[in-house]
Image (spheres, grey):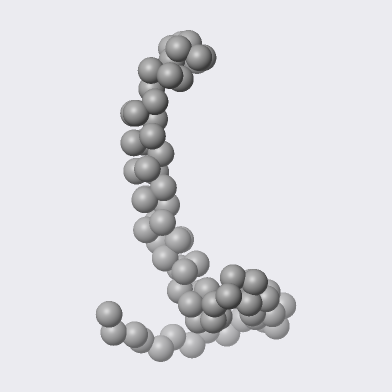
């Protein structure tokens, strides 16, 4: 996928927080921001919800037996 440059202005506190969090994750600030935008756009969230729905479908009987169907 082709990359496009995007310039963003933030206050120094926000910039430092981004640098620190990226460093903690072992990635560049650019990659960190890119990941945040993807998560916010729902790509990661959608995958999580799909996996959770699949899990619940597979273990529905177990939950019903343990907690009752009315809960």
Q: Which residue is drawn at 50% across and 67% down?
A: 36
Task: Determine whether, in the image, residue 28 is placed left or right of residue 57.
Answer: right
Task: Determine whether, in the image, residue 5 is placed left or right of residue 71.
Answer: left
Task: Determine whether, in the image, residue 7 is placed left or right of residue 41.
Answer: right
Q: Which quadrant, please, contains the N terminus?
A: bottom left
Q: Which residue is drawn at 50% across and 81% down?
A: 30
Residue 52 placed where, x, y %? 41, 39
**Camera-nearest residue between 52 and 41:** 52
Q: Residue at x 37, y 58 (%)?
A: 43
Residue 46, placed above or below residue 61: below
Residue 50 placed where, x, y %? 34, 43
Q: How many marks?
A: 0
Residue 68 placed where, x, y %? 48, 11
Residue 53, placed above or below residue 71: below
**Camera-nearest residue between 40 and 68:** 68
> Residue 43, can we see it?
yes
> Residue 18, can we see it?
no
Extreme residue toward the right, this view: 13
Residue 49 placed where, x, y %? 39, 43
Residue 17, placed above or below residue 39: below
């Amino acid at each position: 996928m082709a990359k496009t440059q995007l310039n963003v202005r933030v206050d120094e506190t926000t910039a430092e927080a981004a640098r620190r969090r990226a460093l903690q994750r072992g990635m560049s600030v650019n990659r960190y921001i890119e990941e945040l935008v993807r998560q916010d756009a729902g790509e990661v969230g959608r995958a999580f919800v799909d996996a959770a729905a699949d899990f619940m479908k597979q273990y529905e009987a177990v939950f019903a037996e343990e907690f009752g169907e009315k809960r």
